[in-house]
Each structure stands twice: as C-alpha cells, then as structure tokens.
Image (spheres, rainbow, N blue to C red):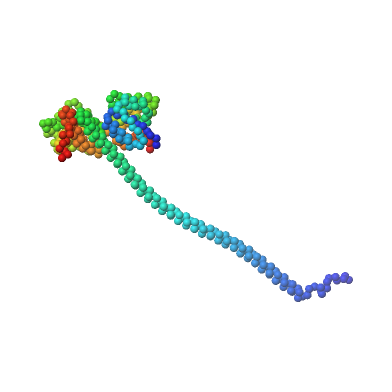
Amino acid sequence: MAEDRRPSRSDAPGHDLSQERDQFLRTFSKGAQLTREFVEEYESLQRQLQSLQAENGRLRAAVEADDAIRDLLKKIEALESEKRELLSHYRRVEEVTSDFNARFHEMEDDFANLANLFVASSSLHSSLSPRAVTRRLKEVLEQLVGAEQFGVYLVARDGRALDPIATSGLPPDVPAPEHLAHGLLGEVARSGVARIDDEADPSLGSIEKPPAVFPLQIDDNIVGVVAIFRSFAQKTKFSTVDFELFKLLGQHAAAALMSSGLFAQAERKLPGSEAFGDLGR
Amino acid sequence: MADFTCLVVEDSPMMRQLIVFALGRIKDLHVTEADDGVDGLRKLASARYDIILTDINMPIMDGLKLIQRVRTDPVHKETPIVVITTEGGSADRDRAIRLGANAYITKPIQAPKVIATVKELLKIG
C-alpha cells in the first residue's frame, strides 16, 4: 500500500483562517473595486475641471473682447463726433471761402469797371483840342462801350437841330442834322433823359431804333446827345459798367467838348489868373 | 514765382492804359508798351518777352503782320501771342490763329478775361 504523502489535514489552514482569508479577499477586492471607481471618478473630475477651466478661459477672453469692443465703440463714437465737428467746421470754412471768393470777384469786377471809368474820364479831359476830344470820345464809344455805329450830336446855335460832329460806321448820307422837335434823339435832347433799351440785343439795333441815346449835359444845359445805333456783333447786352459809362460820358464828354470848343474860340489862349479872381472871395 | 515780361502793342493810349491796369493785377508781371507793330518789333529785338498782347488795327504795321514777323523770330517764335481787337468775326479770328496767335479777345475787354488768358498762357496758378 502506497504511502499517503499528502500533508495531513493538520497542515491545512484552519477553518477560521480560511474564512478570514476569504473575508479579507472579499474586502480587498471590494477595496480595489472602490479604488478603481475612485480613480475613474477622479479622472472624470479632472476632465471636468479641465473642461471648466477651458470654458472659463473662453468666457474670460469673451469678456475681455467685449470690453475691447466697448472701448472701440466708444472710440468710434468719439471719432464720429470729431468727424461731424470737423465736417461742420469745414462747411463753415467753405462757406466763408466761397463768400470771400464771390466778394473777391465782385471787387475785381468793380476794380475793372472803375478802371474803365477812370481811363475814359482821363482820356476825355487830357486834351483841349476839339478834334482830339472828339477822337477820344469816339475811341471810348468804340473800344470801351463796343459801339460800331454811332453819332455824336451837338445842339445847333439856333437850338432847333442836332448837328452831327462825329460819327462812326454810318453811311455818308445818314448823319444829317436831326430836328430837335422830332424823333428819339430830339426827345432825349429836350428831356435830358437817356433812352436805353437794356432788354434788346444792341448788336441788332438800327438807325431807326437805336438801343441807346443819352444826353450830353453840363449842369442843367443839354448841349447834345450821343446815339448808339448798333454795337459790335460780340456785344449783345449792355452791362452795368456801360450804364455808368453813359452817365460819365453824358457829363464829362459834354464838359470836355465845350471847354475844348471855348479854348479853340479863344485862339488857344489859356485864361489868366484873373479869370478865377473872384472865386477865392 | 519767377518774374514774367509782357509786351503790349496797341496804338490807342486809352486801351493801353486799360490793358496795363488789368495786367497790373498779375503779380510779378512786368509790362512794356509799344505804339504799333514797328515799335513792337523794335522792343522785341532788344529784349526777350514771355507773352505778347497785340491789337490788330494799327497804323504803320498792323497786328497780323506783327504776328507773322514774331513767328519767324528765333527768340520769340514760341512766345504766346494774345490778340485784342474789335474784330469779332470768325474769319478774323481764324486768320489770326492761323498766323500763330494763341488767344483772341474781342473789345470791349473784360479785365478778368484778359488776366485769366494771360495767366493760362504763362501757366501761372
């Protein structure tokens, strides 16, 4: 018979120990399970924390961005207001500039008109020769007024007619004496009131229908008339300076013509101081 | 701005005075006057001008002959010429331009127009 070499029952752990071991193993396995659950939960919380941190970062960035936008909006608003102010200032400056330019051009025109009047006046008064005065009067009418056909008439000694003393652009038979009692020229010579058609085109005027007739006058004495029958083709309207020139010529041409006529009659002798003797008293 | 020189050829002293008045509004423009075409040529021979303003109807030598002579002058052949005249017809204008005028102004003159034309030809701002 073979010898039983198995350990005897007395080598095996006792019943209690076995139970204890099982108990321990169960407890250990539960603990391990619990630990695994803890670790899993920890890992899950870690992930949640990271996610929250990321979310927090995003939110922070968004808040910062909102602030930046608010700042930018404020800046835009300030700039817009500045722009509005600048535009309004620019408009005011533009208005002033345009006003200034308009006034400047007005002044330039006035200056040019004054120059015309000055030149016309000084030209008429710079000679005591009736021929020279007449030539200058014709020059003023041609070059400053733009008259192509015109006549300068003086009241005859008998006071019944207007004698032509200078004409330009008229047929030879036209400048016949005009009767003072008839016609437009006679009417202007009698009344002393200029007749100027400021609506019509003076370049379309005619001998029958002169666009401008004005009196030559010294004080209240009408000494003659100037009749413009037609202007040059380029002169289609009388301007402000023309009306001023008519007024100036009416007075200055009359004085220049009369004084040169008297000077010629006095055989070109200049009056001595005795002629002015009474004036100082 | 550099100075400019201008020659005004016009037989009427009154018109010359008026043109000189107008040109006086242009800063640094020095104006010389001539009575007619011959006087104009004499002055052109003795000095160089940047611009010439001339009348057409003048005694001794008219403005058109003056333009012809200026255009053959090596010193002034390129000099701008402005014609100022009572002749308002297109034939007169065309003739003057054909002979070498650069601008044509009819009388009665408007000072602002004379000033603008001269400034434009001299390229003054």
Across and down, in percent, residue B27 comes to 35, 37
What residue occupies the far bottom of the structure in this picture?
A16
* Residue depicted at 47% across the width and 55% down the height: A72
The image quadrant where one finds the N terminus of chain A is bottom right
Tell me residue A116's x, y (percent): 26, 36
x and y percentages locating residue A170 in the rendered image: 20, 28
Q: Is residue B113 visible?
A: no
Given residues B91 and A121, the one toward you in this image is A121
Q: Quadrant of residue A161?
A: top left
Q: Answer with left or right where residue A100 lies relative to residue A220.
A: right
Q: Nearer the viewer, residue A49 or B91?
A: B91
Q: Is B110 positioned to the left or the right of A154 in the image?
A: right
* Rendered residue at 25%/39% (across/down): A240
- Residue drawn 76% across the image and 74% down it: A17
Q: Residue at x 16, y 36 (%)?
A: A277
Residue A232 figure quarter: top left
Q: Is residue A250 left or right of residue A63?
A: left
- Of A126 and B99, which appears nearest the observer? A126
Residue A262: % across, % down: 16, 31
Is residue B73 in sight in this rendering? yes
Of B25 and A54, nearer the camera is B25
